[in-house]
Image (cartoon, rainbow, N blue to C red):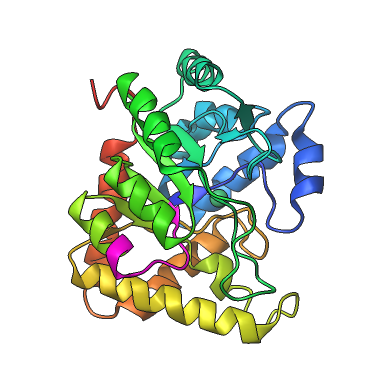
Amino acid sequence: MRADCHMHMILDGVYYRAAIDHQKERPDEALIRARLADYRDAGFAFLRDGGDAWGVGAFAAKIAGEYGIDYRTPIFPIHRNGRYGGFIGRGYDTMEEYAALVAEAKAAGADFIKIMISGLMDFDRFGRITSEPLPPEEIAELIRIAHGEGFRVMAHANGAAIVRAAAEAGVDSVEHGAYLDEEALAAMAEANVVWTPTISTVGNLIGEGRYPDAVLRPLFELQAENIRRFAAMGGMIAPGSDAGAYAVPHARGSMDEYRHLTNILGVGAEARLEAGAREIARRFRRGCRE
Ligand SMILES: [Zn+2]
């Protein structure tokens, strides 16, 4: 089963603002159908969307079956107001508001809950993550509430401390996971977290000119080394390209993720990625905790 376990139907791989503006009023059905056809033609049978506030991924999920694609959506991703995620998701200020968003996603047919608990890698400065992470107690509460509603939780998380906290709180998948250390990797392996390292978001930028290769290369090497360490611990790794992100086009970028991960993991990569994708498919559907 070829899978992209982390993609964004609303984004275009070029410029997120324009891509979102284009579908803000209503999903562009022709565009979505063309992307689904590209995925199908490239052999993809499973997609997990990160969600958006305008119903684009939710619409894609409704028609993806026509393309032989099993498509999972959180409807929209959830962030704390003022922290990373405001450009694409829905925000909360209080836990009551968060619980109401989870209920709203459930009513809209969400397959799982996606939360944003840290910022992004800064491609201009090695070691820096944009935006402050959420405190561990808050992360635990977000996960507890979603699990209580029968949902698995996909968490956008960068930084060792935050990923360790999420793993210890029972998160079901960690997305990106830049700058992890031995302890964070061990915590993920211990808790059976599936890691989606989205290496294409870095690998596809090298030599591309927008960001300094002097930052990108060590970032790629560190992520590659951590992927190998996690695999050696028996950790589950899923292929997820972040398709729609800059320089990661739909379908083609999803193939890039397989290429990068296969180069990094070497012998046995195919079986390992297949197992990771199957575990994501098994977990990230509605009611699987009930
Ligand atoms: Zn993403």
**Total count of labels:** 0
Residue in the picture at 39% in, 71% down: 261
The residue under the point 25% across, 46% down is 279
Does 4 sit above or below residue 259?
Answer: above
Measured from the top left, where is residue 229 in percent x and y?
27, 74
> The C terminus lies in which quarter of the figure?
top left
Residue 43 in view, yes or no: no
- Left or right placement of residue 134 versus residue 17 in this view: left
Residue, x 76% and y 45% (percent of image)? 19
Magenta region includes residue 91: no
The one nearer the camera, 102 or 9, is 102
Vertical arrangement, residue 13 with respect to residue 135, above or below: below
Residue 152 point in image, percent of width and height? 34, 33
Horizontal and vertical percent position of residue 253: 55, 63
**Apparent side of residue 146 relative to residue 122 in the rendered image (left or right):** left
Which is nearer the eye, 33 or 75? Answer: 75
Which residue occupies 68% across, 28% down? 54
The part of the chain drawn in magenta is 175-184
Residue 264 as seen in the image, left or right of residue 289:
right
Asked which quadrant contains residue 249, the reply is bottom right
Q: Is residue 181 magenta?
A: yes
Instruction: Answer yes or no: is residue 132 visible.
Output: yes
Residue positioned most to the bottom: 214
